[in-house]
Image (spheres, rainbow, N blue to C red):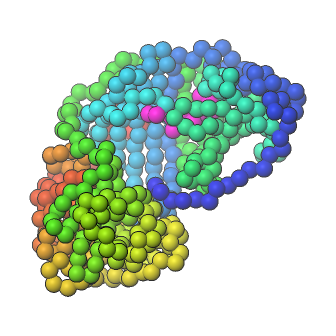
Amino acid sequence: MKTVFRILTISISISVAGLSAAGETEDELIDKVVAAYGGDALINLSSFSIDKKFLSPTLGQSHTPDLEEINLNVQYLVVDIESGSARYETLFDNRGGVFQNATITDGETATTINYQAGTYGSAAQADVYALGGGPMRTSDPILAYELNKARDTAEHMGEASYMNRTHELISMPFPSSPDLTLWVDQETGLISKMTRMNPQFGQLDYVFKDRTEDNGIPYAISTNFFIAGKPNLITVRNENTFNRSFPDSLFEVPDGLSEEGERIDTSEMNATELSDNVYHVGQGGTFSIFINSPAGLIAAGGSAGFAQRLDHYRNETGNYQPLSYQVVTHHHSDHVAGLADAVAAGATLVTVDSNVETIRRDGGVPDAEFLLASGRLTLGQGDGRVELYEVSTTHAARFLVTYVPEEKLIFMADHFNSPYVTGTPTANINTVTMWEALEALDLDFDRIAVSHGARIFSRNDMRDSVADFEPVGCMADRPVCQ
């Protein structure tokens, strides 16, 4: 998600640095928090688990621009502090299907599990905080535990009123994250809220209430999460456990899975020449296609970092002509995040009429020029022309597919991808509905370039992927399936 939100600010009443209104030092305030969260049971924490089910608005990823759907987001984190092992599982249930993954780590190496594909492989990140920092920040006793560990660098920031109660604000570092600000109820020592700043999205708020306890450690049942004041994760279920034993099998790869194949290295910016006039350029998970056509230079794929991809294309090819058109595949926030770069390079944005206002707002291009496509639009004539086709899929109600007839090539976003060098990609409902739309168009194509990966697929790759598709629910007897 790449939507840019306005930054919210808070107004607080600052007391003398290092002292609360009651004259407490940082250490005394931290001692109050630790005591509120179980004292020695918290200080000597040996293990914990966080089991959460959230409802999550789509926030810039909806089927249509005018309606935000609600997705299901389930997270299960287990951390054995003594051994350094952890397991983090996620399940997302949305209109594209069920997506279930897990990562296990011993602190040194990590393995990722893709239940949908039935595979396992090496994970890029073995650090527990990088792996499970998200759910850890949604657990108020874990924040208290980390505050106690960081007492030498924590800083009292003053006091503020929240829900008509006086709160002490204390700033603390948190691994793999910007600093956090805890809002500590002055009377109870419990954490009512945590805030932190995200350089892209603005202020993030974590709100804690309605407590229960496990093994003498209280925790908030409700832990809602807000981005710039807008709800992002709404609690349906939250269960925490502390100082319990977990079986070794929890940190092992389950039977019945296959080791994944070789992954494509996308760590460096790369330009793949698909023909003299067509290049696929990108790095990591963001790619664009550049077409030197009779209508001028045309690009498709508008994710963040577009300026870097355009510069790389120009350096590779020596083609420095202005960018004539930027095809906006659909209205999703991550696919309009780079459009300001395209407009700065001279591009007219090509989209459908219902997406214009969303693109102006979320893409940060209020003064952009637009060319509207409805059904079909051709840019240029003769060989090298580019044809755009509007299709409807479960992913987006109005989506533009870019087709280069001379190269028998199409470019699409989101519906189809694989990080592996070979093998049939795993399909989901989005893949199936896109394939059905392409079949109805009856286009003569044999290659597919995509926006989120480097691999160039064949028509048969997509056909076989769809043929193998079977709708599935939760794919293992795991807590995320409850």
Q: Is residue 297 left or right of residue 334?
A: left
Residue depicted at x 45% and y 62%: 337
Whether residue 281 is visible to the viewer of this picture, yes or no, is yes
Q: Looking at the image, which residue is at 31% across and 23% down?
A: 252
Q: Nearer the viewer, residue 88 or 175?
A: 175
Q: Position of residue 458 (x, y in %)?
A: 13, 59
Whether residue 352 sits left or right of residue 190 in the image: it is left
Q: Position of residue 392 (x, y in %)?
A: 31, 71
From this view, report whether residue 31 is shown above or below residue 176.
Answer: above
Q: Quadrant of the C terminus?
A: top left
Of all residues shown, which one is farthest toward the right?
22
Q: Is residue 249 left or right of residue 202?
A: left
The dominant secondary structure in magenta is: helix
Splitting the image into 4 quarters, where does residue 478 fall? top left
Residue located at (44% from left, 66% from top): 341
Residue 25 position by quadrant: top right
- Numbered circles on residues, count: 0
Q: Is residue 419 magenta?
A: no
Nearest the viewer among 198 and 46 is 198
- Answer yes or no: is residue 221 visible: no
Q: Position of residue 291 (x, y in %)?
A: 24, 70
Residue at the (46%, 28%) spot, across then down = 128
Magenta stretch in the rendered image: 130-143
Q: Is residue 8 above or below residue 254?
A: below
Residue at the bottom extreme, as displayed: 381
Instruction: Tell whether position 141 is magenta.
Output: yes
Return the x and y of residue 140 as percentages of the image width and height: 63, 33
Question: Viewer-proximal residue, 92 or 211?
Answer: 92
Q: Is residue 387 above or below residue 128?
A: below
